[in-house]
Image (spheres, rainbow, N blue to C red):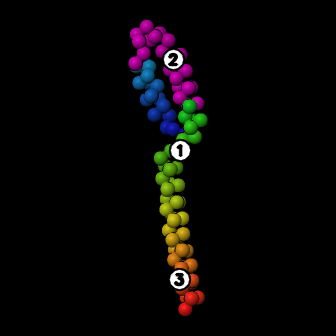
């Protein structure tokens, strides 16, 4: 999920851009924006940078193992042809 601090930053920037006449309703607007953003981000099924990096490392190790296995298969095929 997205960092709550980032959501708060977006909410603050939106509420700071509100016209002065809406300042009285600022708390309601902030709450509604926060709820809408949280719901939108939840639907996007986002992952954190840390989760992404972990999965990238797993993928890299998997690729290395696959390359090693491909090399072994090639060597075995060559040894059987001789």
Residue at the extreme top of the image, as rendered:
21
- Residue at 44% over, 11% down: 23
Stretch of the chain drawn in magenta: 17-39
Q: Choose between 44 and 16: the one closer to the eye.
A: 44
For disc 1, the marked residue is 47
Q: Choose between 44 and 17: the one closer to the eye.
A: 44
Q: Which mark is residue 15?
A: none
Which element type, helix, strand or loop, lies under badge 2? helix
Q: Does the magenta segment cover residue 30?
A: yes
Dominant secondary structure (helix, strand or loop) of the stretch shown in magenta? helix
Question: As displayed, is residue 79 above or below residue 55?
Answer: below
CA–CA distance in space, label 3 to label 1? 40 Å
CA–CA distance in space, label 3 to label 2? 67 Å
For disc 3, the marked residue is 75
Which element type, helix, strand or loop, lies under badge 3? helix
CA–CA distance in space, label 1 to label 2? 27 Å
Q: Along the polypeptide, which appears first: circle 3 or circle 1? A: 1
- Residue at 58% over, 40% down: 45
Coordinates of residue 61 in the picture (x, y in percent): 51, 65
Question: As displayed, is residue 36 above or below residue 58?
Answer: above
For disc 2, the marked residue is 29
Question: As displayed, is residue 1 above or below residue 22?
Answer: below
Coordinates of residue 80 in the picture (x, y in percent): 58, 88
- Residue at 40% over, 19% down: 16
Q: Along the polypeptide, which appears first: circle 1 or circle 2? A: 2
- Circles 1 and 2 in contact, beta carbons < 8 Å: no
Coordinates of residue 32 in the picture (x, y in percent): 55, 21
Q: Quadrant of the N terminus?
A: top right
Which element type, helix, strand or loop, lies under badge 1? loop
Q: Choose between 63 and 82: the one closer to the eye.
A: 82
């Amino acid at each position: 999920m997205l960092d709550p601090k980032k959501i708060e930053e977006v909410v603050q920037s939106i509420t700071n851009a509100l016209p002065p006449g809406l300042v009285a309703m600022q708390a309601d607007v902030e709450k509604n924006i926060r709820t809408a953003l949280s719901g939108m981000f939840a639907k996007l099924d986002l992952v954190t940078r840390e989760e992404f990096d972990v999965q990238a490392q797993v993928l890299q190790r998997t690729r290395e193992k696959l390359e090693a296995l491909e090399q072994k298969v090639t060597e075995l095929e060559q040894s059987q042809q001789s």
